[in-house]
Image (cartoon, rainbow, N blue to C red):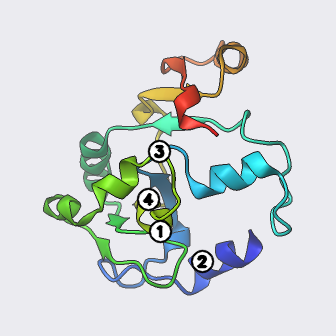
Amino acid sequence: MKEIKRRRMEELALSSHPGLHVGECVPFYFCPRSVMLYMFHRRNHPDIEYKGGQEPILHLMADFARTVEWANQQGLRWAFTNSNAGSRYFEDFSDENDLNKLDWEAVHATQWSGHQDKKQAEFLVENRFPWKLVEGIGIYSFEWAGRVNKMLEGSSYKPPVKPKPEWYY
């Protein structure tokens, strides 16, 4: 969605890291079954050019603590938000002790109705994220697992690929 991408790059700065915009970070959701995945599933949003559905979408899984440690070693800033970082009304934090400020009930909800914003809490890492920190890949089905494993054949690092149909609509 071009307007959201523009807003993330130009307007939405992190209060925990002045001068760093949301769009300058690699974003991760804390939850599966995001609202954006639902829009991909529906294939009918006028602002989304992609119409390939949810099946090809991969969930890259990473450990929060390991990622924070890596980012700190690299001198990269990181933060997490208590709602969608593409909105104008999130709060952001850069202290692991503030994880309790997330609405974990909303994050873990299987339906996003009534939880839409808080379910979309994000973890943001400045600029880049290394492949070696991907601890697993959640995919739609066994068919897609075969496709992803085929893509990984030449890679020296192959995180486990697991069908996670409960993470999809």
Which mark, residue 87? none
- Is the residue under label 1 in contact with that under label 4 (CB below 8 Å)? yes
Could one spot residue 158 in this view of the protein?
no
Query: In percent of the image, x 54 and y 36: which residue is there?
Result: 167
Dot 4 or dot 3, earlier in sequence: 3
User: How far from the left and from the top, in percent, is residue 22?
Assistant: 49, 72
Choose between 123 and 18: the one closer to the eye: 123
Dot 2 or dot 4, earlier in sequence: 2
Give the secondary structure at mark 1. helix
Which mark, residue 117? 1
User: How far from the left and from the top, in percent, is residue 87?
Assistant: 53, 78
Dot 3 or dot 1, earlier in sequence: 3
Nearest-to-viewer mark from 4 and 3: 3
Dot 3 or dot 2, earlier in sequence: 2
The kind of residue tagged 4 is Lys
Which mark, residue 119? 4
Can you identify the residue that label 3 sits on? 110
The kind of residue tagged 3 is Thr
